[in-house]
């Protein structure tokens, strides 16, 4: 079974303190679900029209594990902390080749 990667990008963040509170709870929830945080923060560079926004990459053992982590009660509780702090956020789950 191929590993999967959860890639989250944040185009806007209205409250950095609330995002930090979400990040602590979400990070713990995703790690408890088997996720391994590989990278997080602002891009070192953007190319070909990329947006300079916070990006998080988390590795999971499979697409199913990544989906289960997102749907877990612990992560759903973390999402409540996020609220409308990240009005423009994109999460993608991609399978490794």
Image: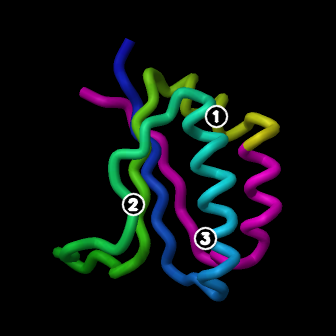
| Label 2 element class | strand
Residue of label 2: 40
Which one is in front in this view, the residue at disc 2 or the one at disc 3? 3
Answer with the quarter of the image where residue 20 lies: bottom right
Picture residue at 17% right of the left edge, 75% below the top: 47
**Span colored in magenta:** 75-97
| Label 3 element class | helix
At label 3, counting other C-alpha atoms closer than 10 Å, the crowd grade (few under 14, some 14-19, many 20 or more) is: few
State the mark number for residue 69. 1
- The earlier-in-sequence mark between 2 and 1 is 2
Magenta stretch encompasses residue 86: yes
* C-alpha separation, residue under disc 2 versus residue under disc 1: 18 Å
At label 1, counting other C-alpha atoms closer than 10 Å, the crowd grade (few under 14, some 14-19, many 20 or more) is: many
Picture residue at 65% right of the left edge, 80% below the top: 17
* C-alpha separation, residue under disc 3 versus residue under disc 1: 19 Å
Picture residue at 34% right of the left edge, 46% below the top: 38
Residue of label 3: 20
* C-alpha separation, residue under disc 2 versus residue under disc 3: 12 Å
Residue 40 or residue 48, whichever sits in front: 40
In the picture, measured across the screen, residue 10 lies left or right of residue 96, that is right
């Amino acid at each position: 079974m191929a590993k999967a990667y959860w890639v989250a990008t944040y185009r806007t963040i209205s409250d950095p303190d609330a995002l930090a509170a979400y990040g602590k709870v979400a990070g713990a929830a995703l790690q408890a679900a088997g996720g391994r945080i590989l990278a997080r923060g602002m891009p070192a560079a953007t190319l070909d029209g990329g947006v300079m926004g916070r990006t998080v990459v988390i590795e999971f053992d499979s697409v199913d594990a990544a989906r289960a982590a997102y749907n877990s009660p612990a992560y759903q509780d973390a999402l409540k902390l996020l609220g409308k702090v990240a009005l423009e956020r994109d999460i993608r789950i991609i399978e490794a080749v």
